Amino acid sequence: MNKTTQNRMLAAARRAAKRAYAPCSNFKVGAAVLDERDRIHSGCNVENSSPCLTVCAERNAISRAVNTGAKSVKAVLVFTDTDGLTPPCGACLQVIAEFGRNPEILLTNRKTMRRFRLKDLLPLRFS
Ligand code: THU
């Protein structure tokens, strides 16, 4: 992925994180999905008083991508305004796997970025 796309994804994820609804954890996450047409779709986590109903930023971004006509995912960027990096949870990895064979997963915070491939984080997906 080129630097411009990466910067656009980062900006979209940062904006999304600001919109996160996280009254339970106060942990705001933003995600950006790059689709097969190089369009970027963002999502934030949306929590609920009934904890099982919380939806992660990554899955909200994927839902938005699909609802906008995306067919597959080339990359997912996750942003948290924290010292540590936030890898997608197992459920999100499985959902990402549904839409790409081995997309890039970029983990970012206020100071660093680390690049992975889906298979680094989820070597054996269920299919
Ligand atoms: N969360 C995400 O949105 N994405 C992740 O990759 C990990 C966790 C959210 C879910 C919940 O709202 C909050 O972070 C704390 O777990």
Image: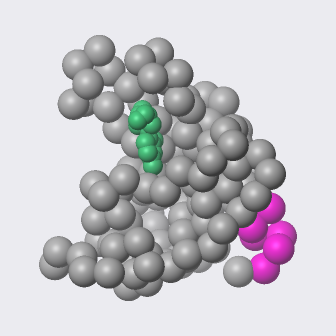
Name the colour scheme. Answer: one colour
Q: Is residue 70 left or right of residue 90?
A: right
Seen in the picture, residue 54 relative to 87 is either above or below; the reply is above
- Mostly what secondary structure, the magenta segment? helix
Place of residue 74 in the rendered image (x, y in percent of width and height, measured from the top left): 53, 77
Q: In which quadrant is the N terminus drawn? A: bottom right
In this picture, residue 1 sits left or right of residue 102: right
- The percent position of residue 27, horizontal first and vertical second, equals 53, 30
Task: Tell me if I can see residue 93 in this picture.
Answer: yes
In the image, what residue occupies the spot 40% across and 81% down? 119
The relative height of residue 4 versus residue 87 in the rendered view (above or below) is: below
- Frontmost residue, 92 versus 83: 83
Q: Quadrant of ligand 1?
A: top left
Q: 39 or 47, which lies in front? A: 47
Q: Residue at x 38, y 26 (%)?
A: 47
Q: Is residue 99 visible?
A: no
Q: Tell me which corner region of the image, top left, top right, bottom left or bottom right, holds residue 7.
A: bottom right
Residue drawn at x 63%, y 47% as measured from the top left: 84
Residue lying farthest front? 83
Of the 4 image quadrants, the one containing the C terminus is bottom left
Residue shown at the point (45%, 23%) measured from the top left? 25
Name, please, the residue furthest toward the bottom.
101
Residue 122 x/y as whole percent = 34, 73
- The magenta stretch spans residue 125: no
Residue 46 x/y as whole percent: 42, 30
Picture quadrant of residue 48: top left
Position of 75 with respect to 49 (left or right) is right
| Picture mark count | 0
Which region of the structure is painted magenta?
A: 2-7
